[in-house]
Image (spheres, coloured by chain):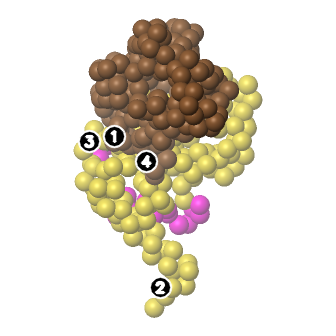
Amino acid sequence: MLKLTFFKVMIIGLGLTGMLNATVLVNYKDTSLLKPVNEDDREKSLKAFGTVMEVIKSPRCINCHPTNDIPRQGNVHRLHPFNVNRGEDDHGGLVQKCATCHHKENNGYTNVPGAPHWGLAPKTMGWFGLTDVEIAHALLDKSKNGGRSPADLVKHMSTDSLVLWAWNPGKGRSAPPVPVDEFRKALDEWLETGAHIPDK
Amino acid sequence: MKIDFEINGKATSVDVDPQMPLLWVVRDELNLKATKYGCGKAMCGACTLHVDGDIFRSCSLAVEYVSGKSVTTLEGLSKNEGHLHPVQQAWIDENVPQCGYCQPGFMMAAAKLITVIPNPTDQDIKANISNICRCGTHPRIIKAIKRAAQIQQTTTLISDGKAKE
Ligand code: FES
Ligand code: FES
């Protein structure tokens, strides 16, 4: 449904009504539009999506993408103690903020994790407890992904220092199961191949 | 590495490992002993102090982060030695401490709380301060914070010239 909308917009924009053809290629990097779905790419696309999901659903990522207001901790996703709450700006409450304990880097004395702009992803980007299909839609929906085009999404997930912290989580915390380069490649490939979404 | 900052309103300079926790600097380099070492894991709040008006758990704050900033410990909470801070007055009035170890951290958190929530409810206090007191003085702490908020309001009114009768 979402891809159809992108596709329609692209077709209208290009004045190509009547030439509806799934082989029309638009590079999302240039146009912020996804490539039209090509069923031949489905298998490749879904495989790439599976790799992306392995990272997104790893504790280092999803623990700070709650659908409610409380971050989670550890590989068992326990609720963060100390009444920690996203607050108005996703960086904590009026008195205790994320920065009360978390700073720009992992702390070598207390082992408290840290990275620049440590905080929760906005509630619209909450993924915890969602199905893969729901997460896929959320990733592509600008109203839920921070207004990002697919190209912005790749950029954010490849360069943001808090995202990259997941691969440098500090002593006793496991990194996502996929190396960061493979993750970037998979995300790029999923979007390049039309961002196919699994049936369930 | 030399790091310059302000402590309780006075300029200071320390020459230490930039990763050294601020708590160690305050206690061992500057000899200010009010701020306490409880867990050393950012979990108990005994080491809470203010940096540029916000609370920080100083066992988990590398001193390099306070370069050029203003640090306040319990020793510097009252601006004027003749007048206690509302939190200090309320703590005396409510006779809060048991062993006392956790109290400086609670008082620093309380001082911040009444500036951002001037009329706090029990729930406001419980939701916004997560320090631990192993002696179980929490009920007295809640009473004292509400009292401190009242003292703060009265003091503000008097200094504004609105409550003189
Ligand atoms: S000593 Fe810093 S929080 Fe316990
Ligand atoms: S008064 Fe003893 S730990 Fe709080």
Is label 3 on the same chain as label 2? yes
Q: Secondary structure at mark 2?
A: loop
Earlier along the polypeptide chain: callout 1 or callout 4?
A: 1
Real-space CA distance between mark 4 and mark 2, rounded to the nearest whole angstrom: 35 Å
Ligand 1 neighbours mark 1 (CB distance < 8 Å):
no
**What hue represents chain A?**
brown
Real-space CA distance between mark 1 and mark 3, rounded to the nearest whole angstrom: 33 Å
Q: Residue B99: in sight, yes or no?
A: yes
Residue A118's place in the image compared with B105, above or below, is above
The three-letter code of the residue at mark 3 reads Cys
Chain ID for label 1?
A
Tell me where residue A190 appears, x and y as whole percent: 50, 16
Real-space CA distance between mark 1 and mark 4, rounded to the nearest whole angstrom: 11 Å
**Residue position marked by numbered label 1 in the rendering:** A68
Residue B156's place in the image compared with A153, above or below, is below
Tell me where residue A4 appears, x and y as whole percent: 46, 31
Q: Which chain is yellow?
A: B
Give the residue furthest to the front: A18
Real-space CA distance between mark 2 and mark 1, rounded to the nearest whole angstrom: 44 Å
Quadrant of the image occupied by residue A28: top right
Instruction: Give the extent of the magenta segment.
Output: B79-99
Marks 1,4: beta carbons within 8 A? no
Chain ID for label 3?
B
B94 sits left or right of A28 in the view: left
Chain ID for label 2?
B
Q: Which mark is residue A87?
A: 4
**Residue position marked by numbered label 3 in the rendering:** B135
